[in-house]
Amino acid sequence: MFDKVLVANRGEIAIRVMRACRELDVKSVAVYSEADKNSLFAKYADEAYLIGGPSPADSYLNISNILEAAEQSGADALHPGYGFLAENSTLGDECTKRGIKLIGPSGSVINAMGSKIESRKLMEKAGVPVIPGNSKGVTDPDEALQIAESIGYPVIVKASAGGGGIGMRTVYEEDELLRALESTQSVAASSFGDSTVFIEKYIEEPRHIEFQILADENGNTIHVADRECSIQRRHQKLIEEAPSPIMTDKLREEMGSAAVKAASSIGYTNAGTVEFLYSNEEFYFLEMNTRIQVEHPITEVVTGVDLVKEQLKIASGRELCCTQEDIQVRGHAIECRINAEDPLADFAPNPGKITGYRSPGGPGVRVDSGVYMNYTIPPFYDSMISKLIVWGRNRNAAITRMRRALSEYIILGVKTTIPFHKSMMLSPNFQDAKLHTHFVDEYKQEIMDNMVKIVEKDKEMESRLKSTFLPSKNVAAVSAAVSSYMAHSLEKNKK
């Protein structure tokens, strides 16, 4: 096992990795920007090094400064977390040159899966189902028209090197195609430095289902069950759950086997995720994420496998902790991403100082967070405050527990997505698991109406709470006000 691991990331994922290190008796090293000098993750680590200014380009994307900190600290391994440099093959190459182990797959695998066109070709070769479309770049308008006609409208134009839906355009008629082609090429060039695009059949109202993969360096590859990530907004996940509500033993065997085949065919090692679209009892390979996912905790909760500890063990040369037969799904887990955003203002970012904070607890509740009371959320990075994870013996129990946990969650000073999640847990269509990737758009008005009511109901209690968090108030007063707020919120949100 490693002696010291540098975590090249920030916020809750940095703390998550450091916790795994601590349980394995491995020292952790944090790197932080000037904007994060008072961050919880920098204080939690055994050592912390300033690596640059608040801009990601000057800090968390600055490979040279990060590796300089790694050498200065004597770290023998580096964990990239997710986002930033997590899928950057150059980081892996530079780590190798300096004798530092990157906790993740090889650079060649990262590059292969980072290209949507290349990954399509590899999956076709491996016999993994892919969405009907072309497996090479398209630049010629006439060729684009021929491809679209052959697979049938609607189609979707995607950037090969893209992610997060950036530049993606859905086309329903021939007249729209050339404009979409030009637009996507332009966005791809400016966002990813690569204007290559391709065309696929547009799957209407699919479910987004993914399989967690673990693969060691001794040739063992397994899947650690499935997750449903269909609740999205602009192709960004908002709520995830495990297992998928539609999953059966037969379907899990089929999709899980395809995921393992996908990983094995490219010589994958460490933790990764194979993502599929599911529609009309058919599933198709979407992409592979060559890193730990934001939503990994729900898999940990229902399987009992500590995925981050497994990452560290695999990278140190150990074999997997279990076989495929050992993986059993118990109960149901849901994760809500709590962001500093105003859901009533089209989810506009709302960074600022947290003037009151209390996270929920009790049976079956987990909060992965990197903030604290009086912490100032900087405007330079992703707006995530925390991930709220609950477990229940079945899906209905998990939804009920999530409603309770959300009612206890107090964050003052910034607007958050908590009202959105409260609204979602009350949605009859969500409760009935009628999920697809356009769910939020389809039921936008219902969700919005519920959010307005929830925000109004909470305003009075929140105004009462603000004064209790002032330093002049005693602990008893704070405790009483918080308890009153939680009881009030839970009762109101039942209605």
Image: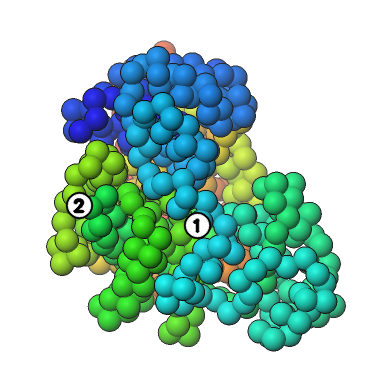
Residue 131 in view of the camera: yes
The three-letter amino acid code for the residue at tag 1 is: Met
Q: Is residue 223 above or below residue 106?
A: below
Instruction: Write the residue at 47% across / 70% down.
Output: 123
Report the quarter where the C terminus lies.
bottom left
Instruction: Write the residue at 25% across / 67% down.
Output: 394
| Residue hosting label 1 | 113
Q: Is residue 236 above or below residue 18?
A: below
Q: Is residue 277 above or below residue 89?
A: below
Q: Earlier in the sequence, mark 2 or mark 1?
A: 1
Colouring scheme applied when the structure was drawn: rainbow
Which residue, as the protein is rendered here, is positioned at the far front? 97
Q: How busy is the neighbourhood of tag 1: few (under 14 within 10 Å), some, or many (20 plus)?
A: many
Count of all numbered marks drawn on residues in the image: 2
463 sits to left or right of 397: right
Instruction: Write the residue at 46% across / 59% down.
Output: 288
Q: Is residue 3 above or below residue 368?
A: above
Residue 15 in view of the camera: no
- In-front residue for pair 462/233: 233
Percent of width and height locating residue 485: 39, 40
- In-front residue for pair 135/173: 135
Instruction: Write the residue at 27% across / 60% down.
Output: 221
Report the quarter where the N terminus lies.
top left
Percent of width and height locating residue 186: 78, 54
- Tag 2 secondary structure: loop
| Residue hosting label 2 | 320
